[in-house]
């Protein structure tokens, strides 16, 4: 709602710079309560970034073109393998590796936040890097792609209320519980630092699979069957983790790569489907925020399903999903 009121050029840089500043400051925490406080305000700053980015993409791309773009965004933001290299800076300039991790991750957000304030257009209508002919092409394509209900200015409170009266909102919410990958991989016998590195191949596999999968979804102009197929693949992969629980770690690790790829493919296509099915800018913005927020709540739930005491098989926990 703030994005609709203030505009992308103001609100997104505020979120990015605030998030980066709090993240950098987290490197100075000394106690548990300080960390919890920092994470609370970090959550406030980051909460609008993901739905805001998805909403902004919908202002530029037609429904057919959106899924593949969101796949690049999701897979790029999900890869945490860089943590493996950063933690080896432990002791540099008197800072621990985890402190360097917060600082280095914060810097791009702050720098890009400043650049976005200067360079980010509100939409194709005001994009200075497009000439008049190019702007008309983009605007006309978007106008032909929607029913005309995207033209409202400011905030529509009727559309705000419509989000919570729409059954699709609750259907999408049910698909938002997530897994916590490092806990699963660490159960295969890796130490904490190597576990971060071992998350790279599953995310790399999911990056490739998601982009190809979403290109297929865009090409065939179809979302639902792609979501079902991706969900079935991930379901089979996690079922194999139970069936092969006494096998070597390599086989289990392959199942993880397949399962993560299936989940990520579903997330990317589902998000595009959410954006595609909500007409009106306010309704789309609020729906993306509500559904994304539910996914954020699902992350700590997923971390509690997979408990370290049940490693390496986690079969009591998989029963929640099978």
Image (tube, helix red, strand yellow):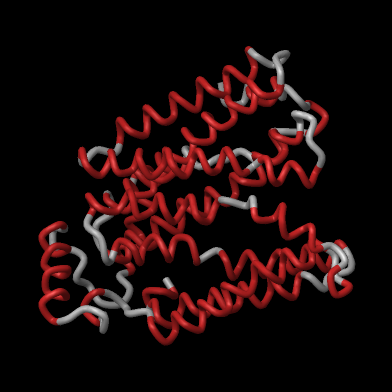
Q: From what the image shows, is residue 10 above or below residue 32? A: below
> Could you tell me which quadrant the N terminus lies in?
bottom left
Q: At 46% across and 55% down in the image, what residue appears?
A: 290
Q: Residue furthest bottom?
A: 118
- Is residue 316 in view from this perspective? no
- How many numbered circles are shown? 0
Left or right relative to 312: residue 237 = left
- Viewer-proximal residue, 11 or 134? 134
- Viewer-proximal residue, 39 or 100? 100
Q: At 30% across and 61% down in the image, what residue appears?
A: 58
Rendered location of residue 190, percent (x, y): 78, 35
Rendered location of residue 71, percent (x, y): 40, 49
Q: From what the image shows, is residue 251 above or below residue 27? A: above
Rendered location of residue 110, percent (x, y): 58, 78
Left or right relative to 273: residue 263 = right
Q: At 32% across and 49% down in the image, what residue appears?
A: 67
- Is residue 255 in view from this perspective? yes
Q: Tell me which corner region of the image, top left, top right, bottom left or bottom right, holds residue 187.
A: top right
Q: At 53% across and 30% down in the image, what residue appears?
A: 259
- Viewer-proximal residue, 25 or 95? 95
Q: From what the image shows, is residue 226 above or below residue 218? A: above
Rendered location of residue 298, percent (x, y): 59, 44
Left or right relative to 173: residue 4 = left
Q: From what the image shows, is residue 266 above or below residue 255? A: below
- Viewer-proximal residue, 26 or 93? 93
Q: Tell me which corner region of the image, top left, top right, bottom left or bottom right, holds residue 252.
A: top right
> Could you tell me which quadrant the C terminus lies in?
top right
């Amino acid at each position: 709602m703030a994005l609709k009121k203030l505009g992308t050029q103001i609100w997104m840089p505020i979120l990015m710079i605030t998030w980066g500043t709090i993240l950098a400051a987290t490197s100075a925490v000394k106690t548990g309560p300080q960390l919890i406080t920092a994470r609370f305000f970090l959550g406030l700053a980051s909460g609008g970034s993901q739905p805001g980015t998805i909403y902004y993409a919908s202002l530029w791309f037609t429904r057919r073109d959106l899924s593949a773009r969101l796949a690049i965004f999701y897979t790029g933001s999900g890869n945490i393998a860089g943590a493996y290299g950063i933690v080896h800076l432990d002791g540099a300039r008197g800072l621990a590796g985890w402190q360097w991790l917060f600082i280095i991750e914060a810097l791009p957000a702050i720098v890009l936040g400043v650049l976005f304030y200067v360079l980010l257009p509100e939409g194709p209508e005001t994009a200075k890097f497009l000439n008049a002919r190019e702007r008309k092409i983009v605007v006309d394509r978007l106008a032909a792609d929607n029913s005309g209900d995207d033209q409202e200015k400011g905030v529509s409170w009727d559309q705000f209320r419509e989000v919570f009266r729409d059954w699709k909102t609750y259907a999408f919410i049910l698909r938002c519980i997530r897994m916590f990958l490092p806990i699963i991989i660490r159960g295969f016998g890796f130490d904490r630092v190597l576990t971060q590195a071992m998350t790279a191949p599953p995310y790399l596999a999911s990056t490739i699979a998601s982009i190809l999968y979403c290109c297929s979804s865009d090409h065939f102009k179809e979302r639902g069957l792609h979501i079902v197929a991706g969900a079935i693949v991930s379901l089979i992969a996690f079922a194999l983790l139970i069936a092969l629980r006494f096998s070597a770690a390599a086989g289990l690790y392959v199942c993880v790569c397949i399962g993560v790829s299936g989940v990520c493919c579903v997330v990317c296509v589902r998000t595009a489907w959410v954006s595609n099915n909500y007409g009106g800018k306010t309704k789309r913005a609020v729906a993306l925020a509500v559904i994304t927020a539910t996914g954020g709540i699902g992350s700590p739930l997923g971390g509690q399903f997979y408990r370290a005491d049940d490693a390496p098989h986690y079969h009591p926990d998989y029963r929640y999903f099978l």
